[in-house]
Image: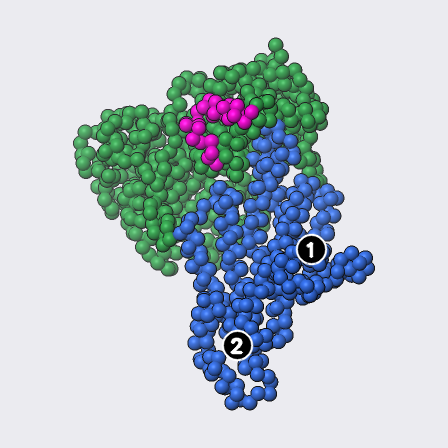
Chain colours: A blue, B green
Amino acid sequence: MLAYIIRRLGVALLVTAGVAAISYALLHAIAPNPAYVALGDRTSPVAVAAWDRAHGYDHPEVIQIVDYVWEIARFHFGYSYKLNQSVGALLKENVGRSAYLSLASLILALIIAVPLGIFQAVRRNSYFDYTVTTLNFVLYSMPSFFLGVILIQFFALDWHILPPLVGDNITSTWAAITHPNQLVLPIVTLAAIQVASFSRYMRSSALDTLAEDYIRLARAKGLSERVVLTRHLLRNACLPMITLIGLSIPTLLAGNLLIEYLFNYPGLGLMFYTALGNEDYNVMLAYVVFGGMLTVLGNLVADIALTVADPRVRLD
Amino acid sequence: MTAALEISNLSTEIKLSRSTVHAVGNVGLTINAGETLGLVGESGSGKSMLGLSVLGLLPNGGHITGGSIKIEGQELVGLPEKELRKLRGDRVAMIFQDSLSSLNPTKTIGQQVAEPVRLHRDVTQREAMERVLEVLDLVGLPKPKERLADFPHQLSGGLRQRVMIAIALACDPRVLLADEPTTALDVTIQAQILRLLDDLEQRLGMATLLVTHDMGVVAGRANRINVMYAGRIVESAPTELLFSSMRHPYTQALLGSIPRLEQDNTKRLLSIPGLPPDLTNPPTGCRFAARCRFATEQCLQQEPPLTGDAQHAFACWNPVDGPAELTESVAHATRAPVQAARAGLGDSPSITISGPGVTQNGIKPLLEIVNVVREYPITAGFLRRQVNSVKAVSDVTLTIHSGESFGLVGESGCGKTSLGKLIVGIEKPDSGHIRLAGEDVFSYRGTKLRKARRDLQMMFQDPFGSLDPRMRVNAILQEPLQIQNIGSQRERDEKVRGILDDVGLPAAALERYPHEFSGGQRQRVALARALMLEPKVMVADEPVSALDVSIRSQVLNLMKRLQIERDMASVVISHDLAVVKYLADRIGVMYLGKLVELGSGDDIYARPAHPYTQALIKTIPVPDPAVEKAKTEVGIRGELPSPIDPPSGCRFRTRCPLAQQICSEVEPPLRRFGGEHLAACHFPLQTPEPDAESSLTTAG
């Protein structure tokens, strides 16, 4: 088990390095020289060359890539010339708020989706099942920002129950947690999109589990249907969800991007969005590399979690 | 005295989205406490639905449409779900076929056995655990206390089945419904479990409904047998009477279609043509009429009622009288060349074990397997170093002659399938050689290897999994010819039609997809595919074990006929010695990767030299009540040891009644017991030939 984790972490490092190298190369191929971003569009070529020399952009591309990967390996994400701050500090400042938004919406989504999927499976092909399925497909096909706009329209503008945007007072993760009314809409929007896919998945997994012989044996023992579902079906039907959740963690980052922008919530997504407009090189790169890291880690965590949840799975 | 279980006029339907399956129709049966009733039928006959009806656990859409089910006089039909639940697991319990899928993979054995006790008995956690230990001990689980925290996948199939029986017995049920309780097990384990069920039933005085497709399983232990066909009971009689003087043609055909060890294997098995009827739209008249040899106009018009006395009832207009004699020979063509060759071989002392190339009397063997070893590595640790290996095939040497049919038999995990894969080159041996007509074909590469593969074909066990579901039969059969670049399109078409005819499928089958066929027909397609290239050797891995009894004999007869007509060597792999003996001229018995005995069918069956072979023969359930009831021993005790770490010396010694000190120290060499009969045992049951023992030492 330990050997397995060490090996997987080694692979994770390699993958991250690869992501960093490829992203760096791609960005340099399509974006203008960072010197213009830092110094302004009308800078003289001489000044640009001097700036390049000072920041290592005069080296051959391969060397630049190796340098970048090496920096990443030491958790140095470079410097934002636009914001005059190190990218590491920017990440550090925003990561907590994004994590809170992601986690809260993920948990909310699971609390809704797991029972919903099971009940759909139990009442398969009933009106309840059809209604939920239809709703799910509507949500699933809806862009997240569109859903957000609709919710803002109803809950904030029409009914005045909730604020339409996150205020400037959310300066820390703690502030985000202690001002729940400001975060209701972003969390609900993000959760609703996830409920759609999770409950579909849960439904099919629960259907498979319901057809298992051990469910029949549980009934043959004389257990009531409620006990059969909670004691024998729930855990087994949730096993495939673990992998799905592990894979969805990096997707949340992308989902956050639009939601954070829409609600003006200061997180990684909003930071990246701003960086896009500013051509803020190192911030964009850091965001992509961070996504790569989350993907690899999400997978690893899911695999380890699966060994805890399923006694049949052994890692070696 | 009220019967423990009394079912009368029971009808059960299953509503599908567009049609209704009439699964059980007007069925009645009675079982007293301490008795076993055997319910025999093929898949789809409604026998399992009958069992599930009793528990009220029919699948979605299923419901009882009429009749009555009484447990010790209490009516179950119409009982509210809440009341039914109180009976389930308490007074009526059920054992299912597959213990791996029937136990919850994420709960421990202890939790699962305790569940019904906690539910139905007013006991504390501690008292429940005491009962769990008691009942696990009752079903013969060794060291139950240490197993409580184990998960189902950590136990072997036999032990898991014991756990499932323990769950059923946890609350001392009055009625036990056993639905194919041993079908998923190996014969040696099957014998142990059946013995256990027998014993428990007598000790606990339960009524048992034993549902099975296997006549051999019920022969020795049922007091009475009901034969079910297409949702109806067609015959009901005490066990001895049913086997000795059955009246229904279906019962007769079912018994006649089972290959038996003592039987002359040149005779055709009695086969039941066609398929069971579709129960969404059952035929009028007798449901068996379409497949019956004795059917008349009346059979097609009127459904025969269950007549006769309470002792022996049957539903037939033209009853038969007793079992049928097998008289028809398999094929008129004799195997003259092969027989002659083998007659000559019988005299030479070194046919099987001699070195490569030419044997003493000049007949070149077709396939030589010389000291073949196959081990699957097990890796561990950070660098994935190999720490051990599964010894699938260990130093096996044997020779197969052209036109010969060779059978490989043994329990699951004995390496027979691995050896089959090695023969056709799906896998490569770690050491040793496999030569086809003197050439080491698997050392070839590229085109040459592809050409050589033409001569070696394989037919797989599962006809559902081995045919590409998106290819029509025509494409499936043409593909081997295309790959090998044989013939023009026209010649290929002709060839496909010819083969299809040979395996008894209509030309219309060409345009259909595999899922449109029944299991038996699909296995015919699989056979046709294997034959397309006219291989010199065909390996058939469990060719009939996925098929229903009545379909099995159709495929066996077909394979037997084609073997003879085509003069092709075949290797038949099966766990069922009777199947192997029916199809093969010569049989090899494998145990844990080793070939332990080799000989003609009669050598193996009538004069087994190895204790394992003898035990294997003893454990096979024979469809004959006299034979089954006379059995006093279980055959083989214990379970197959791990092939990762096989016992030293003779690998069978841990389960052998004759084992002594030497067996753990010295690996027994193959010794000759007359002619081609060889066995590897220090204490053989026959007297070996005295001479040339050392020259035969290939093993060890």
Quarter of the image for residue A174 reads bottom right
Looking at the image, residue B302 lies above or below residue B527:
above
Q: Do labels 1 and 2 share a chain?
A: yes
Q: Is residue B426 visible?
A: yes
Disc 1/disc 2 C-alpha distance (Å): 41 Å
Q: Is residue B254 visible?
A: no
- Which residue position holds label 1? A180
Seen from the viewer's position, the closer of residues B526 and A184 is A184
Query: Is tag 1's residue or tag 2's residue first in the polypeptide sequence?
Result: 2
Left-right relation of B695 to B66: left
Crowding around mark 2 (Cα neighbors within 10 Å: few <14, some 14 to 19, many 20+) is some
Give the residue type at disc 1: Pro
Q: Mark 2 lies on which chain?
A: A
Q: Mark 1 lies on which chain?
A: A
Magenta span of residues: B124-151
At x 46% / y 76%, what residue is drawn?
Answer: A64
Seen from the viewer's position, the closer of residues B700 and A135 is A135
Q: Which secondary structure, mark 2?
A: helix
- Which residue position holds label 2? A28
At x 44% / y 57%, what residue is drawn?
Answer: A9
